[in-house]
Image: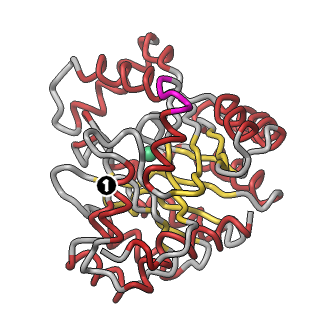
Amino acid sequence: MQHHTFQPGIIDFHVHPLPLLEEEVLVEELAAAGVSKAVLLAVDVDPGILDDRGVQARIAFEMFNAGLWDISALDYIKTILKLGRTPNEHVAALVEKHPDIFVGLGSINVSFGADYVARMSRKIRMLGLKGVKILSTLQLFNPAEKRGELRALFDEWAKSHGLVMIHTGCDPGPWENPLFSESARPSNYRWLIEEYPDVQVVLAHAGSYSMRYPGIWLDEALEIAKNNDNVWLDTAAVTYLASIEKFAAKIREALGWERFLFGSDYPTVTGRSLKSMVDEVLDSKALTSREKEMLLIENPRELLKKL
Ligand SMILES: [Zn+2]
């Protein structure tokens, strides 16, 4: 154990302040883990769209194509959207209350059109948030069909040196099926990242999250990051990238740890405290002391300075 050898200043780049999560619980969880700053993420989802017959039919079609013949998955999706929905205003209010510990990212569902993207981007900036998160899984969009909207989003955030965080990898529930999460492969976004070298991008989960196939699209994520200096990767829900030797070594060889950001995904990883994830990194035998310091403190600090 060498916790004490680190300066204070651990930053968690991936925290979900779900409306059900009490503010005091979140603040205490961060303090208990020795985290001094956290990036809070909004999630712009609308459970109401699942009442639309057309949307239901489209999702059912995609599920069947993925080999998911479970109709109750639609109910599961609706529940996840209800629990996960985190308004931009909610994140902004927390940041305003604790500006010393919180940095906020808004969220925009690009499937609601380019006008919506522009209007929401202005609103999110006015709320004092530093960028946006998009997630093709819960927001139920296919990036190949939303090129115009994605360009509109990147145009907006290029103007204000903002950050775009993109969910990559599988997701819980029906999205554990990689075919149903195909939209969240990092390679779907390569063209966009290359078109906007000035927009800082975080590939959340480093393309790796999957219960069945841990590290599922890590190679793709690393390849994109290697060729694009504006790309960062976070360890949310995949802390094992920093503790399992084969992943840590692959990252060291393919890219280095210079653009990896510690993220917990708290409180969505069932049964894990934030502290247990920080400790997994601190106690890891797969990383050097220097790499731990970069992951937990220096890299996130450097990225935040750019915003
Ligand atoms: Zn997350």
Query: Is 40 within the magenta?
Result: no
Q: Disc 1 designates what residue?
A: 276
Q: Position of residue 93 (x, y in %)?
A: 71, 32
Instruction: Tell me: 86 left or right of 63.
Output: right
Q: Main secondary structure of the magenta part?
A: loop
Q: What residue is shown at x 31% (from left), y 54% (from top)?
A: 276
Screen quadrant of the N terminus: bottom left
**x%, y% of residue 17?**
53, 36
Task: Out of 131 and 300, give the one closest to the viewer.
Answer: 300
Give the x, y percent position of residue 178.
25, 48
Q: Quadrant of ligand 1?
A: top left
- Of residues 245 and 97, the one nearer the viewer is 97
- Magenta range: 20-24
Mark 1: amino acid:
Ser
In this view, 288 is above or below 297: below
Nearer to the camera, 94 or 303: 94
Taking the spot 44% from the left edge, 50% from the top edge, the residue there is: 32
Q: Quadrant of residue 98?
A: top right
User: At 21% across and 18% down in the image, what residue appears?
Assistant: 71
Quadrant of image for the C terminus:
bottom right
Question: Mark 1: which secondary structure?
Answer: helix
